[in-house]
Image (cartoon, helix red, strand yellow):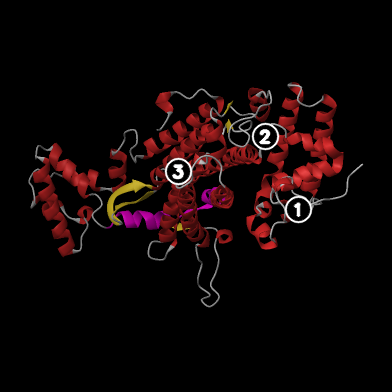
Amino acid sequence: MEQPETTEKPWTGRFTEPTDLFVEAFTASVTFDQRMADYDIRGSIAHARMLAEVDVIAAEERDQIIEGLEEILEEIRSGSFKWSIALEDVHMNIESKLVQKIGDVGKKLHTGRSRNDQVATDIRLWLRDEIDAILAEIDRLQEGLLILAEREAETIMPGFTHLQTAQPITFGHHMMAWHEMLVRDHGRLTDCRKRVNVMPLGAAALAGTTYPIDRFMTAKLLGFDAPAENSLDAVSDRDFSIEFTAAASLLMMHLSRFSEELVLWTSDLFSFIELPDSFCTGSSIMPQKKNPDVPELVRGKTGRVYGHMIGLLTLMKGQPLAYNKDNQEDKEPLFDTVDTLKGSLKVYADMMPTVVVNIENTRNAAGRGFSTATDLADYVVRAGVPFRDSHEIVGKAVRYGIEQGKDLAEMTLAELQQFSDVIKEDVFEVLTLEGSVAARNHRGGTAPEQVHAAVRRARRRKAEELSGTASFQDQSY
């Protein structure tokens, strides 16, 4: 039979007056940490099982506690659970409801633990699942890029340095550059997850507990690799949150770079690609506008993730051991980082396979700006001219082209030979855009053949990664 509801705090024994109402609201975290309720209950169930196993509570008490917690979880999931700011946080709200449901037996659940190790465990359980969801979104985006790279493996576009036309490349090769950034992001988050997956539970407030707990049993029940080694560090460590936001910041930086290029490429000045209408918006005053809002917004959201990383670093920098109330401020930036990152990845994973490339425009742009100048220099070198001399020869040819309004491929043989007599009729084979990209036919090069090979390697690497058979040779970094 359920007991009357109460908002009495479990720590009031030492106090002689109630908490100031503003202080109560100011110090409460339940408005945002309730999103960890599933994990709080999961951790409590594992803790109860362990307490019964080591004879700290009876098996009947364990069963009552677990049944009560499962009922509370159903209420939370259905939306009927009433959260109370007076009870401060997700932990005390659930514990209070448990006591209301099953009586004094519910008070035994907190034996051998503290909210300090409880919250640290909840965050890790929650973040572990979120990392897995983020990795799945990275996989989806990577596959979208592979689809686009394969489809556009022979599409010629200009490669840029300093946003100036540099050399011809293929659109597929460019997409594979983005893909490689995500390979590193995936690796960083996978590595970060290993340090997240360490269990603080059992550290109690800071020094451990006098009860004969079995931390290895609890860790196994919760899927942790191991319990944390040091109780002081276990309750006060937030390195894993900072490491996650650092990895998230790098990932968002990559998405922001993607965004910058997409914004440029969709503009009339470039007109390299077309984004689907479903990922764009119009103007309230200019009817001709089609604005690339998705990449622009992702580019903007990058700043908030950077801010969360700096905020967490600043939060932790002055704290003595062990737990301090400051750490309550770790959750909102971490939660928002996860939400922002997942949303950005999802919209990109949905959008990228639908990008339409304006092949004629990208090819025409690659034909401007003397993009095959390096090919001409290499041609002259192969004829026996030192590279520095070759560089000067081609530089003069480019200057002549600027004056005459001609690209290198548009010059006659006679015009080219005025700069060097080693230039022969076959020079035009290397001055074509197709010849330029095809000549870079080595692993990592822009040749269409290499783009297709890179796509195959990426897919094989992903399959081996999922099966746990990836070799060092197949790891990018």
The residue that disc 2 covers is: 113
Location of residue 266 in the rendering, given as x and y in whole percent from the top left corner: 44, 61
| Cβ atoms under marks 1 and 2 closer than 8 Å | no
Disc 3, disc 2: CB below 8 Å? no
Q: CA distance from mark 3 to mark 1?
A: 50 Å
Q: Amino acid at mark 1?
A: Trp
Q: Is residue 353 magenta?
A: yes
Q: Is residue 41 left or right of residue 304?
A: right
- Which residue in the protein does label 1 denote? 83
Tell which of 204 and 37 is nearer to you: 204
Select label 3 or label 2 by which is in front: 2
Magenta residue span: 348-368
In front of the other: label 1 or label 2? 2
| Cα distance in 3D space between marks 3 and 2 | 53 Å
The residue tagged 3 is: 149
Residue found 70% across the figure and 46% down from its top: 14
Residue type at tag 3? Ala
For marks 3 and 1, give the one nearer the viewer: 1
Q: Is residue 272 visible?
A: no
Relative image position of residue 215 (x, y in whole percent): 64, 25
Residue 380: numbered disc = none
Chief SS of the magenta region: helix
Q: Secondary structure at mark 1?
A: loop
Marks 3/1 in contact by CB < 8 Å: the verdict is: no
Front residue (pair 128, 389): 128
Which mark is first along the chain, 2 or 1? 1
Q: Residue furthest front?
A: 16
For marks 3 and 1, the one nearer the N-term is 1
Q: Is residue 309 visible?
A: yes
